[in-house]
Amino acid sequence: MREGEGKTRAAGKKRSVSLSGGTRILTYVCLAWAALVALVPLVWLLLSSFKKDPLARPGFQLPESICLDGYVSTFRDLHVMRYFGNSMVISLLSVIISIVMISMSAYVVARMEFKGKGLVSLLLYSTMFIPATALTYPVYNLVNRLNIYDTRAALILIYSCSGIAVSFFVIKNYYMNIPKEMEEAARIDGCGYVQTWGKVIFPIARPGIMTAAVLAFLNNWNEYYWASLVMVTREKMTVPALLSTFTTAFRTNYNGLFSAMVVIILPPVVLYCVFSRFFVEALSGGAVKG
């Protein structure tokens, strides 16, 4: 009898969470529209990169013949791998520095009680609403005073301090879902705050931390404003700053520009595909099991 009741309850739960026909159709329509909005620019960009003159056959018109001159010039003449190396080093170092600082500060705010806790959270969240242009003069002045203008260290410093609010929000919310009993058990076993974070909190909150790290990396990889402001030497530029070399006062090489854009967006796409499972775990509340 009990087994029959258990099966009946399980079947009832499955029926309760199943979507109705209208809701399922609406969900599929919304997902299809989101996929269309995301894929149309990518398909347009890919087709344009294979056209010798994208302005002669604009939009989704197929190219008359496949033209690879833009890809050849991107790798042979512009030495794009050099800029890839610059962007990779700057983005990775800035992500490591920012995530280590933010993950520990979020742990303090999420798990401890102290005076001014609300003010600290408010100040961190408020940085989300400050535009980059409003920080131009103070950041530019700071970089000059530190004598790191036109160096990779300048971008690493700027990127490490930017995007703090988003990373703090993601990591802090993930910490809040971890049962405090696990932390108390670690403290009883003699672990300090650092050991508790490293041996208990970090393994559980890894999906949230990795999600914040990937988002920060994508933001740093695609950032153009600061890269074009504090970097002057061509050999030190990042890949977004490379795109400005295709535009002059008299003409724009659209074939080379679109080809370079395709090459530049490949690493973030591959990175997201590799770490997509961390996004799913973080957004679904993931690894904490009672």
Image (tube, grey):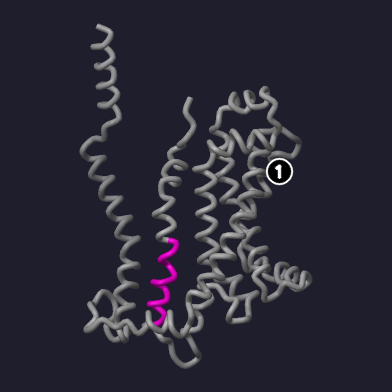
Residue 244 spot, x, y in % from top left: 51, 81
Check disc 1 and report the residue beneath it.
Answer: 119
Which residue in the rendered view is the most extreme toward the right?
145
Mark 1: which amino acid?
Leu
Q: Is residue 146 left or right of residue 250?
A: right
Residue 88 spot, x, y in % from top left: 54, 65
Q: Is residue 267 left or right of residue 108?
A: left
Q: Residue at x 54, y 45 (%)?
A: 209
Q: Which residues are magenta?
A: 256-268
Q: Residue at x 41, y 50 (%)?
A: 276
* Residue 42 position by quadrant: bottom left
Whether 267 is among the magenta residues is yes
Residue density around tag 1, few if under 14, some if 14–19, many if 20 or more, within 10 Å: few
Q: Of residues 51 and 26, which is closer to you in this image? A: 51
Location of the N terminus (image quadrant): top left
Q: Of residues 54 and 49, which is closer to you in this image? A: 49
Q: Residue at x 66, y 66 (%)?
A: 134
* Residue 260 position by quadrant: bottom left
Which residue in the rendered view is the most extreme toward the top?
1
Please say if 276 is above or below 43.
above
- Provide the secondary structure element on which disc 1 rests: helix
Q: Of residues 129 and 144, which is closer to you in this image? A: 144
Whether 226 is among the magenta residues is no
Q: Main secondary structure of the magenta part?
A: helix
- Count the numbered circles shown: 1
Q: Residue at x 45, y 42 (%)?
A: 283
Residue 48 spot, x, y in % from top left: 32, 77
Residue 147 spot, x, y in % from top left: 76, 73
